[in-house]
Amino acid sequence: MENQFNLEGGAFSKELTREFFKKVYAYMGLALLVSGGVAYYFAQNPALFANLFLTESGISPVFYVVVFAPVGLALLIQMKAQSFSIPVLMALFLLYSALMGASLSTIFFQYSMAMIAQTFFVSAGAFGGMAILGYTTKTDLTKMGSLLYMVFIGMFIASIVNIFMKSADLSWGISFLGVFVFTGLTAYWMQQLKSTASNPMLSGVERDKLALIGGLNLYILFVNLFLSLLRLFGSRD
């Protein structure tokens, strides 16, 4: 009887985990689809991009709002996940994805389509490999994740400084470090999500919210890994 209970409990836990990750990857895929669609639309309409984001003297303040607003939205989603409803979180999630797409549209003006596609598939391979590693490893990655997040904060500050410095060497260093940081954080987050997914004490609404946050975090890591690789290896037109 006890063995049957353990088997049924194990099957139930596996089903919970399977359904949770389906939602996580669905949210991540949706974000990539929205961002990719918006980015491609702006790339195909350079006049619209110029009218919205450029001025005679350079870059419009609107563009800086579009670039930095997703940072605030991501923090808002994660900090208010408990109090916001699923529809509100979903609306913020879609807005975040669209704004990211608008800022990502600049890569189409800097790199060839072939290089963007190649880098995307390389990023997908690296991301997938680290995701599997994080899911299957028995090693606790908590300490590594904390360290990588501290490095990430330093990279973020350095990136903002480099907007004004325009140092090619600093940009290259940030991109190189980014590949290491974002692949490592992918493994860390997959381990955290696996722990969350198998928790039978979470309600259905709680699981949906955490799946959305999980999809958001994996999307952020994938996009940053992709951009780091593109800056390192992308050949400009």
Image (spheres, rainbow, N blue to C red):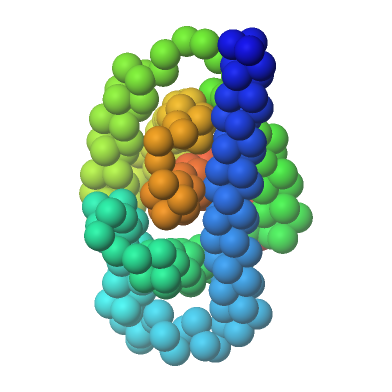
Q: Quadrant of residue 229?
A: top right
Residue 219 image position (x, y, % from top left): 51, 49
Closer to us: 203 or 215: 203
Does the image show residue 216?
no
Question: In this picture, is 88 found above or below 215?
Answer: below
x 57%, y 29%: residue:
13
Residue at 57%, 74% in the rendered image: 38
Give the quadrant of residue 123. top right
Residue furthest to the front? 1
Residue 16 lies, with reference to residue 75, above or below; the image says above
- Based on the displayed image, in which of its 4 quarters is residue 63 positioned? bottom left
Count of numbered circles in the view:
0
Q: Nearer the viewer, residue 229 or 216?
A: 216
Q: Position of residue 74 (x, y in %)?
A: 34, 56
Please provide percent x and percent y for residue 117. 72, 53
Please say whether residue 167 is visible from this viewpoint: yes
